[in-house]
């Protein structure tokens, strides 16, 4: 199991309320929550063609949440007979070793557990299966179609379809527990409400955020309660409970991400709807009235928006999709983010989603909510991400990046059900992966940069786009170490050829980017002529979209030579001697004290070679680690040279070294000095120089000239 793969571990959702009559179970889904029920271990592709998303944007000032209008669309699914025959066919599709076609689906976790022998057996099996299916298709008539239970429902899983066609009583056992006793425990007293609720029974986790009304009858939080008009109703508390069964090794991680991204957010939005329109109270009465009339569960989902909300939430979240829930007439989106962005290469034994993206720049973007960085270490061990641009506004950084659409513009416009002439639709058509959001706003003055940032955020949250550095023919691109060469290459060769019939084949195109005979070059080197530039950049965007290539970036450190340090040492000594002579003339002999040499004082941000040699014992190593943690700008001193790890936060002595380089050793011109100080904060080995070109108005020629002038005092590396 890997934290890089989605695993909601969701078994079901309950809605519990409490009135003057006591606690009661209003609704549960699935309706047959059995003791041995297991969560789906299968994740879906990142982009679901049938996902029904959001369209028009509006803001609710009370909650500061963005709510969206929703338009319906007719969907059709196979009837139960046709679906069941397919299920039976899959179940019968096994060889002597128990391998099924589902096991070798790249979207199934078991895909990553197979051996080469398993694969050979599976391929032989698939040949026989295709031949059998071809013959059966000639004999069978097309299955009939029926409309889905709701116009806005997504394609349902096998479990969802099966459970919908069972009329289960509300008082059946839940995970082997009598609902009477369970509901009592899931309706905590007021003192335990309005905070995280977590309970374990029979190895199953019951997770929620019970909401209790205030003493004054309002439902708002304390800071909002003054402006709320309390509604008169019999409802005292409601609790949306998520039942989970995560693997033991992932227990805390899966519970935390479910609560953070789904449980707490949905519960608070429901509280807002209850506060404004008594939404939970009215829907609870409606559900009970329908149930008294003998309404089955299928019709209940059709007739009650709250039941539909719970059904949609379970269906989408359990399948790792974005859940677009209609709450009190408004649409809100919820999801557990999927890890597709990596700042370093995962351990070879740790699986991840095929086609994931690899780039160091995700460190810079990780604190703006647009990127969910994947694990890059061992199971269960999460790395602390250090944000290099913490002092800067993250929104300010984003505008220098570009958007890469993960589908064709018209497909996205159609899927999110926005009007073809809306502002959002026009924005989607404007997006070019070669243009930063800032340039896009300058080219289209009808859209201000704040609106563009908002649109960009939503497209990324809906998994329709991702942030990249603007594609350029002057940048260097290489095959990503995470490229899905062993998983998707065969199918993608065909897709690439259909998309770009006049370009080299996909394998040849990849070979051009990462040749063995020479180091990677600018992308322009493989473009035959100016007329081919646009088509080659479109192909590059396609390769980025599917995780085949990544940009090679440049990182540098500032190196201080022994010669520079000696020269600065002498200057400081001379300055101190001059001060000492001047002061001695004004002081009595008995008050004169020997002045310490400031250059020989220990710098708290410097580690000497002697200190490093004294760390052979455990206590010495602990002291060194403590020193490193306390120092924000550690300089590692070797015998000859010093590497300043963060010259943007240089100490007084380090600034003397830097000034000696630019003014005396390299004798930079005024123009290059200005560029040098812009570059200084990027000389930390973590911020790519390509970012400097994007956001600090420095040309490639100017940067090249500066790097040539100071080449003896920098160390540079190239990687993703």
Image (cartoon, grey):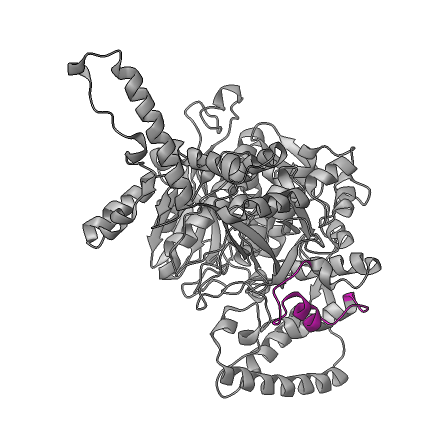
Residue numbers of the magenta segment: 499-522
Q: Position of residue 385 (x, y in %)?
A: 44, 47
Q: Residue at x 69, y 64 (%)?
A: 77
Q: Residue at x 25, y 28 (%)?
A: 596
The residue closer to the viewer here, 452 or 365, is 365
Q: Position of residue 695 (x, y in %)?
A: 63, 39
Residue at the far right in the pictured view: 531
| The stretch drawn in magenta includes residue 506 | yes
The residue closer to the viewer here, 409 or 634, is 634
Q: Position of residue 577 (x, y in %)?
A: 31, 25
Residue 470, placed above or below residue 698: below
687 with respect to 521 (left or right): left
Image label count: 0
Task: Please say whether residue 448 is visible from this viewpoint.
Answer: yes
Q: Main secondary structure of the magenta part?
A: loop
Residue at the far left in the pictured view: 590
Q: Position of residue 572 (x, y in %)?
A: 36, 30
**Quarter occupied by the C terminus:** bottom right
Task: Please say whether residue 304 is visible from this viewpoint.
Answer: no
69 with respect to 628 (left or right): right
708 with respect to 576 (left or right): right
The quarter of the picture where residue 702 lies is top right
**Quarter occupied by the N terminus:** bottom left
Residue 364, placed above or below residue 127: above
The residue closer to the viewer here, 444 or 626, is 626
């Amino acid at each position: 199991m890997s934290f890089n793969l989605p695993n909601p571990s969701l078994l079901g959702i309950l809605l519990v309320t409490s009135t003057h009559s006591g606690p009661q179970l209003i609704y549960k889904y699935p309706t047959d929550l059995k003791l041995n029920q297991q969560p789906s271990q299968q994740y879906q592709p990142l982009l679901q063609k049938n996902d029904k998303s959001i369209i028009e944007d509006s803001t609710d000032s009370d909650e500061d949440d963005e709510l969206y209008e929703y338009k319906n669309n007719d969907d059709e699914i196979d009837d139960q007979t046709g679906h069941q025959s397919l299920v039976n066919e899959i179940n019968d599709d096994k060889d002597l070793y128990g391998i099924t076609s589902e096991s070798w689906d790249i979207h199934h976790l078991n895909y990553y557990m197979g051996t080469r022998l398993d694969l050979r057996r599976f391929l032989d099996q698939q040949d026989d299966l295709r031949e059998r299916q071809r013959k059966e298709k000639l004999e069978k008539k097309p299955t009939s179609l029926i409309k889905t239970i709701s116009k806005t429902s997504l394609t349902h899983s096998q479990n969802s379809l099966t459970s919908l066609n069972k009329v289960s009583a509300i008082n059946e056992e839940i995970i082997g527990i009598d609902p009477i006793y369970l509901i009592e425990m899931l309706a905590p007293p007021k003192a335990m409400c309005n905070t995280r609720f977590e309970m374990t029974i029979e190895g199953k986790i019951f997770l929620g955020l019970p909401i209790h009304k205030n003493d004054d009858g309002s439902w708002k939080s304390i800071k909002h309660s003054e402006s709320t008009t309390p509604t008169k109703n019999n409802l005292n508390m409601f609790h949306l409970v998520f039942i989970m069964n995560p693997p033991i090794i992932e227990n805390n991680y899966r519970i935390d991400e479910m609560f953070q991204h789904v449980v707490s957010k949905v519960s608070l939005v429901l509280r807002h709807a209850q506060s404004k329109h008594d939404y939970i109270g009215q829907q609870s009465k409606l559900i009970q009235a329908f149930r008294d009339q003998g309404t089955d569960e299928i019709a209940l989902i059709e007739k009650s928006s709250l039941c539909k909300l719970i059904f949609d939430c379970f269906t989408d979240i359990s399948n790792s999709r974005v859940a677009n829930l209609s709450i009190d007439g408004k649409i809100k989106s919820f999801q557990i983010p999927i890890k597709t962005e990596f700042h370093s290469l995962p351990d070879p034994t740790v699986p991840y989603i095929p086609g994931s993206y690899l780039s160091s720049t995700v460190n810079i973007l990780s604190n703006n909510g647009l990127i969910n960085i994947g694990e890059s270490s061992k199971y269960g061990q999460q790395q602390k991400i250090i944000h290099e641009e913490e002092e800067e506004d993250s929104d300010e950084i984003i505008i220098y990046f570009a958007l890469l659409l993960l589908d064709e513009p018209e497909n996205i416009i159609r899927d999110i059900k926005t009007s073809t002439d809306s502002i959002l639709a026009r924005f989607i058509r404007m997006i070019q992966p070669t243009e930063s959001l800032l340039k896009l706003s300058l080219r289209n003055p009808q859209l201000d940069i704040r609106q563009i940032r908002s649109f960009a955020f939503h497209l990324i949250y809906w998994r329709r786009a991702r942030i990249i550095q603007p594609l350029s023919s002057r940048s260097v691109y290489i095959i990503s170490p995470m490229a899905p060469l062993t998983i998707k290459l065969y199918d993608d060769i065909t897709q690439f050829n259909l998309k770009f019939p006049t370009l080299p084949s996909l394998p040849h195109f990849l070979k051009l980017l990462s040749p063995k005979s020479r180091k990677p070059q600018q992308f322009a080197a493989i473009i035959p002529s100016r007329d081919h530039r646009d088509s080659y950049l479109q192909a590059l965007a396609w390769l980025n979209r599917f995780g085949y290539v990544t940009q090679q970036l440049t990182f540098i450190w500032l190196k201080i030579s022994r010669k520079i340090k000696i020269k600065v040492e002498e200057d400081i000594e001379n300055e101190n001697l001059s001060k000492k002579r001047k002061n001695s003339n004004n002081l009595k002999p008995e008050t004169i004290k020997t002045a310490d040499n400031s250059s020989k004082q220990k710098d708290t941000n410097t580690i000497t070679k002697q200190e490093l040699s004294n760390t052979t014992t455990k206590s010495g190593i602990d002291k060194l680690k403590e020193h490193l943690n306390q120092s924000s700008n550690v300089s590692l001193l070797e015998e000859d040279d010093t590497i300043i790890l963060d010259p943007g936060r240089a100490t007084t002595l380090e600034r003397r070294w830097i000034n000696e380089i630019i003014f005396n050793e390299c004798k930079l011109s005024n123009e290059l000095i200005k560029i040098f100080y812009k570059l200084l904060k990027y000389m930390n080995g973590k911020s790519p120089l390509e970012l400097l070109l994007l956001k600090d108005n420095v040309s490639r020629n100017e940067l090249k000239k500066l790097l040539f002038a100071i080449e003896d005092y920098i160390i540079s590396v190239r990687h993703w």
